[in-house]
Image (tube, coloured by chain):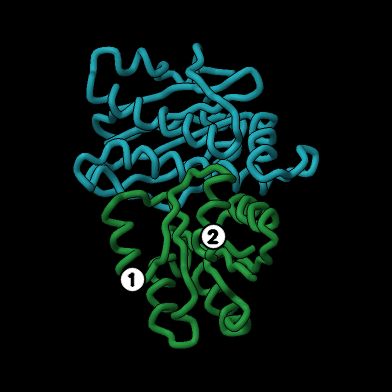
Amino acid sequence: MKLLMVDDSSSIRKVIKAAADMLRIETEEAEDGLQALELLERIHGEVDLILLDWNMPGMNGYDFLVEVKKDGRYGHIPVMMVTTEGQQSSIIAAVRAGAANYLTKPFTAGELEAKIMECVGGEG
Amino acid sequence: MGDMGDGGRAGQVRDDPVMGYVADAFLGSLAEVVSAATGLTFAALEGGVHRVGEGMVGAMGLYGGNRGILLISAEEADLRLLSSRMTGTPPGDVTDADMGDTLCEIVNMTAGGAKLRLSGEEDAFTLSMPFIITGQAMDVSFKGRAGVVAGRLGDGEASLSLRVMFH
């Protein structure tokens, strides 16, 4: 089981990695959408879940989500948005673009772990 | 610790219910962010907020329906503690870059939470990318009739100062 986290904040990536470690899930990380796309080119066969920030320099999370979902190689990988954008309109836009789940920052470690478990169907 | 010169939350918003509502949204959001991210319970503190330039300052421009800037500042020791608690990094291993990143994320999450609290209508403001200001003490002023809210939150271990200025 492998998770790709895409967030420009190293602090948030550390928090996500700690939660993934607790669930015995391996992690890969990228700082923005473009770096994540480059990474997916190489390891898409190994990735089971993508955790995606919205506001990032370079390619933002929404644009990355659209790119992933229209690509036959990656489209099946569930994407969970992890973002400060808590507006209902943002959540609806992300779900329409193909997001499987949505977690608004700030979150506790327990909330993050529960959401990850939801996305991976209880597997760890 | 110096005062920003524009007073604390109570002085700023005593006679202005709208700005009081805005202050409560930002300060409430900041307290929620600190609690969720670090486990610390921050409450309003008496006294002045940090001057811009004392310690490290995280900033974000706000655009859209309301335009302005959000500033959150803290002294280095306090930021080191917050970053350590947020990421699980031992305090002695927290770098300047770690502290800057943690402060940027606190700014980002605080703005996002305040936006949600203020959004009966959708377009309270639009977030931009957070950034860090370091250097000698300086003051920040806006042209025109700026609405300002300011306050300081903390506990016995650490504190953060917040200032929001709207055009």
In the displayed structure, does residue A22 sit left or right of residue B161? right
Name the mark on residue A97: 1
When asked about the image quadrant of residue B100, the answer is top right
Going 34% across and 64% down the picture, which residue do you hit? A94
How many angstroms separate mark 1 from mark 2 (CA)? 19 Å
Give percent across and percent down for residue A1: 64, 70
Which structural element holds mark 1?
helix
The colour chain B appears in is cyan
Question: On what subunit does the disc labeled 2 rest?
Answer: A
Q: Position of residue B51 (x, y in %)?
A: 52, 25
User: Which numbered dot is residue A7?
Assistant: 2
> Viewed as shown, does residue B143 lie left or right of A5?
left
In front of the other: A48 or B124: A48
Which residue is depicted at the point 66% across and 45% down?
B87
Q: Residues within 10 Å of mark 1 (few under 14, many from 20)?
A: some
Chain that is coloured green in the picture: A
| Residue nearest the viewer, comparing B124 with B166 | B124
Q: Nearer the viewer, mark 1 or mark 2?
A: 1
